[in-house]
Image: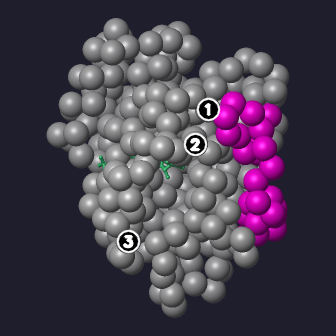
């Protein structure tokens, strides 16, 4: 990965941090995009120490605030001449229905819309850096939405359950990857998504999903893997030159190989519709979105 520039969102803990350690160790120039400057600074020091690389930087990013997403993209475009790999890793699960600064249901807003806008604003740089890769950390939980996106209620105003809304936000990740891969065909930028496994990370344990966090603390060790192992598929998709990885776009991966995601995640018409709705919601019909139409 020497000479390659990698951006990872939510890399101050869990899977993202371990992904950053491995990629920095392999010589990549790594930029972590983090919400909390305090946790980010501690993570930065730890990533540098464990990877033995000083070529790790930090930028501020709150995916729940579109003005922060725009500032982060501008900052990245200013600092990084090239972006070879973008890893959309950050994610949350919340027990209660909460809203972002911009008024979106928080899981849909953070997990999907924030990443949608960030990716859109960085796409031109990714294309200019081709061959390049976008890696989207989705989840097996995309299957919690077997009937697909609720286009009549994307913000879960009508009814809200933690797993339902989380599942739809992770389905949105997979649909975003599918539609982006179609739009970027022929550019040399591949887009794939993944399920990292069931990973003992900070996920659901920071008070956002108290009961789930308690359950994980009690029995999680029986079924969960480590963040190091959870990072493996992200690392593989970011680095592998094997044609079964490097030659694939629009795929869904887990445990190091490609799988078939749910029917809803494979529906190109729904993915295109979600793209249009998302572009409308984030107010971004600029950049590649418009040109690719
Ligand atoms: N753990 C699992 O079993 C599992 C399974 C399937 C999929 N996933 C997915 O894996 C990804 C990584 O999760 P993880 O397990 O590593 O959990 P984690 O340790 O909680 O890491 C999540 C990261 O996302 C960041 N984040 C949350 N909200 C943000 C925001 N508004 N703006 C910017 N960053 C934000 C967090 O930053 P803060 O420190 O500021 O909160 C944290 O660094 C997520 O997308 C998750 O959905 C996890």
Residue 101 x, y percent position in the rendering = 32, 70
Residue that appears at 76% across and 53% down = 261
Residue that appears at 47% across and 20% down = 22
Q: Is mark 1 within 8 Å of ligand 1?
A: no
Task: Give the extent of the magenta segment.
Answer: 248-273
Query: Which residue, as the protein is rendered here, is positioned at the far left?
Result: 38
Q: Which disc, if any, is residue 95?
A: 3
Q: Residues within 10 Å of mark 2 (few under 14, many from 20)?
A: many
Q: In the image, is 218 to the left or to the right of 8? A: left
Q: Which disc, if any, is residue 168?
A: none
Distance from Cα at disc 2 to Cα at disc 1: 9 Å
Magenta highlight on residue 252 = yes
**Residue 176: in sight, yes or no?**
no
Distance from Cα at disc 3 to Cα at disc 1: 27 Å
The disc, 2 or 1, on the residue closer to the chain's N-terminal end is 2
Q: Residues within 10 Å of mark 1 (few under 14, many from 20)?
A: many
Reading the image, the residue beneath label 1 is: 233
- Numbered disc 3: secondary structure: loop
Residue 192 x, y percent position in the rendering = 69, 41
The disc, 3 or 1, on the residue closer to the chain's N-terminal end is 3
- Depth order, front residue of 116/285: 116
Q: In the image, is 30 to the left or to the right of 246? A: left
């Amino acid at each position: 990965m020497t000479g390659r520039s990698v951006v990872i969102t939510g890399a101050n803990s869990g899977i993202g941090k371990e992904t950053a350690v491995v990629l920095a160790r392999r010589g990549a120039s790594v930029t972590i995009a983090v919400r909390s400057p305090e946790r980010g600074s501690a993570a930065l020091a730890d990533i540098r120490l464990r990877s033995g690389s000083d070529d790790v930087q930090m930028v501020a990013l709150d995916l729940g605030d579109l003005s922060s997403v725009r500032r982060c993209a501008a900052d990245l475009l200013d600092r990084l001449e090239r972006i070879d790999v973008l890893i959309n890793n950050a994610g949350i699960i919340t027990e209660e229905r909460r809203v972002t600064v911009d008024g979106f249901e928080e899981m849909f807003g953070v997990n999907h819309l924030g990443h949608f806008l960030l990716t859109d604003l960085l796409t031109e740089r990714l294309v200019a850096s081709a061959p390049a890769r976008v890696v989207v950390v989705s989840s097996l939980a995309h299957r919690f939405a077997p009937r697909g996106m609720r286009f009549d209620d994307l913000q879960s105003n009508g009814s809200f359950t933690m797993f339902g809304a989380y599942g739809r936000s992770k389905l949105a990740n997979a649909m975003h990857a599918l539609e982006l891969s179609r739009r970027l065909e022929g550019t040399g930028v591949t887009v794939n998504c993944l399920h990292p496994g069931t990973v003992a990370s900070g996920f659901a344990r920071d008070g956002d999903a108290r009961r789930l966090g308690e359950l994980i603390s009690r029995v999680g060790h029986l079924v969960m893997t480590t963040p190091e192992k959870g990072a493996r598929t992200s690392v593989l998709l970011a680095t592998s030159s094997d044609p079964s990885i490097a030659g694939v776009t629009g795929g869904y991966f887990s445990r190091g190989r490609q799988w078939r995601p749910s029917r809803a995640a494979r529906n190109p018409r729904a993915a295109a519709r979600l793209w249009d709705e998302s572009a409308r919601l984030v107010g971004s019909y600029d950049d590649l979105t418009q040109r690719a139409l």
